[in-house]
Image: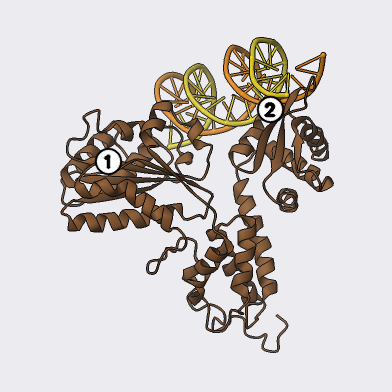
Chain colours: A brown, B yellow, C orange
DNA sequence: AATCCACGGGAAGTGCCGGAAT
DNA sequence: ATTCCGGCACTTCCCGTGGATT
């Protein structure tokens, strides 16, 4: 814009990135090791191990916050299983379903059936047009015809609209739907509370084993980022950049995806300013942006009044830096003020209680039941899990 | 073919109230 | 004794569907 060679509208050469695709969200590390998940990988392998002897693998539920490597490990282990079982003469199939995309029973079955199907069969799986039960019938046939064992990975399982498909999958064997093929289900959720919402019978069969994925610490994040530093040109990254970005990401949520985002944003900022190197100041700005994005994503789809309630909690947190949890009645008072500012009629206390509970399920806030002591009643306290500054900024700029 | 309308289902929201907690 | 949580029944509003009418 202000440079001497400003007649150059487009730059001819990328000064910062060499292989930017390494930093794209969906990029999976193909070669090299998965950082810091050895225990989880071997536990998962252990649960699936019976498949090697043509026996039923255990059903598993994986918990952990976003960006802790759940999907990655599930995919990795199941792929290894297919290879090793092949050497043993056992045919293993894997179906991966992203339940955020296929959130209904029909869509999910359709995806499973069409990914496990091969042209060798005379079974066709149309995109649409047949009933759910027909999909199931064809799926059972495919599985029996082609595989000894099938592992079904249900990612973001909490996004499913109902438990019907879990019901079908968990009972497929005993209900006589499958004759030769054994079924194993890996459920992946980033909501610890998801299990509470599950049907009791599904829960007992699907959660034979549970593993919790802890957030990455700063060292692990640093290793993850360094494994992708080839995305940048030689010498562009200052030596302190990655450790700084890792430290910041670890401090916030230990989310590897976000850590990579920070790195990419920092590069883009450097690019936008025609800098030759990625300096630390860019990392700081990038972190702010990544954090805003993350929170924006978290509250996407929330109703206006949900946001007002969150805003009220953020205001309380900012006004009282020494306290971090507030009882419902105080939140409601501030919420009423927010509504007045927004020129909107406040909802009832009953409704706001529910809205806050929804936010707690989404891990935006945390609730704890408290008691005031003798003759003082009991109540719930709400604590914001996000940086109040970020919450306020995002919520205010949304309007 | 375009318009209208009745209908059902689901989400949002309210009020009531028994009961948990200390 | 006190606070307020959370289940329940109920209302209101919106939206997609599908058949009837113009």
The residue labelled by disc 1 is A183
User: Above or below — where is A26 with respect to A270?
Assistant: above
User: Residue at position x 38%, y 66% from top?
Assistant: A30
Residue at mark 1 shares a chain with residue at mark 2: yes
Q: Is residue A127 visible?
A: no
Image position, residue A330 (x, y; %): 80, 33
Residue A10 figure quarter: bottom right
User: Residue at position x 30%, y 58% from top?
Assistant: A80
Q: Is residue A254 visible?
A: yes
Query: Pointer 1 indicates a residue of which chain?
Result: A
Residue A33 figure quarter: bottom left
Quadrant of image for the N terminus of chain A: bottom right
Answer with left or right where residue A121 lies relative to residue A253: left
Measure how far apart labels 1 and 2 are at the Cα level.
42 Å
Answer with left or right where residue A107 lies relative to residue A230: left
Image position, residue A243 (x, y; %): 60, 71
Image position, residue C1 (x, y; %): 82, 14
Which element carries disc 2, helix, strand or loop?
A: helix
Question: Which label number is shown at residue A297?
Answer: none
Which element carries disc 1, helix, strand or loop?
A: strand
* Closer-to-camera residue (A144/B4): A144
User: Residue at position x 63%, y 45% from top?
Assistant: A299
N-terminal of the pair, mark 1 or mark 2, is 1
Q: Nearer the viewer, mark 1 or mark 2?
A: 1
Residue A55 figure quarter: top left
* Closer-to-camera residue (A215/A353): A215
User: Above or below — where is A218 with respect to A51?
Assistant: below
Query: Pointer 2 indicates a residue of which chain?
Result: A
* Closer-to-camera residue (B18/A390): B18
User: Residue at position x 67%, y 34% from top?
Assistant: A368
The residue labelled by disc 2 is A351
């Amino acid at each position: 814009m202000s440079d001497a060679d400003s007649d150059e509208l487009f730059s001819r050469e990328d000064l910062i990135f060499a292989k930017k695709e390494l930093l794209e969200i969906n990029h999976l590390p193909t070669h090299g090791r998965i950082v810091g998940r050895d225990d989880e990988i071997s536990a998962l392998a252990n649960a699936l191990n019976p498949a090697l002897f043509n026996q039923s693998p255990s059903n598993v539920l994986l918990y952990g916050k976003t960006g802790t490597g759940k999907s990655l490990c599930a995919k990795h282990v199941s792929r290894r299983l297919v290879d090793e079982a092949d050497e043993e003469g056992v045919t293993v199939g894997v179906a991966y379903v992203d339940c955020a995309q296929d959130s209904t029973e029909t869509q999910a079955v359709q995806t499973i059936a069409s990914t496990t199907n091969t042209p060798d069969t005379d079974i066709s799986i149309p995109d649409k047009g047949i009933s759910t039960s027909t999909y199931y019938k064809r799926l059972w046939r495919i599985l029996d015809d082609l595989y000894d064992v099938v592992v079904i990975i249900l990612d973001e399982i909490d996004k499913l609209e109902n438990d019907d498909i879990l019901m079908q999958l968990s009972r497929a064997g005993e209900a006589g739907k499958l004759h030769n093929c054994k079924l194993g289900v890996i459920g992946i959720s980033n909501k610890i509370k998801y299990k509470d919402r599950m049907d009791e019978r599904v829960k007992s069969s699907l959660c034979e084993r549970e593993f919790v994925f802890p957030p990455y610490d700063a060292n692990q994040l640093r290793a993850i980022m360094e494994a992708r530093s080839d995305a940048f040109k030689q010498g562009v990254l200052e030596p302190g950049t990655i450790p700084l970005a890792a430290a910041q990401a670890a401090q916030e949520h230990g989310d590897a995806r976000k850590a990579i985002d920070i790195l990419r944003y920092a590069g883009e900022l450097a690019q936008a300013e025609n800098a030759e190197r990625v300096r630390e100041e860019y990392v700081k700005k990038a972190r702010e942006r990544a954090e805003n994005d993350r929170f924006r994503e978290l509250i996407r789809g929330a109703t206006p009044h949900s946001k007002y309630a969150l805003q009220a909690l953020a205001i309380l947190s900012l006004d009282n830096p020494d306290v971090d949890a507030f009882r419902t009645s105080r939140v409601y008072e501030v919420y009423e003020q927010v509504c007045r500012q927004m020129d909107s009629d406040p909802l009832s206390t009953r409704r706001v209680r529910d809205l806050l509970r929804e936010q707690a399920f989404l891990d935006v806030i945390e609730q704890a039941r408290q008691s005031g002591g003798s003759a003082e009643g009991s109540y719930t306290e709400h604590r914001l899990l996000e940086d109040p500054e970020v919450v306020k900024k995002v919520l205010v700029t949304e309007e």
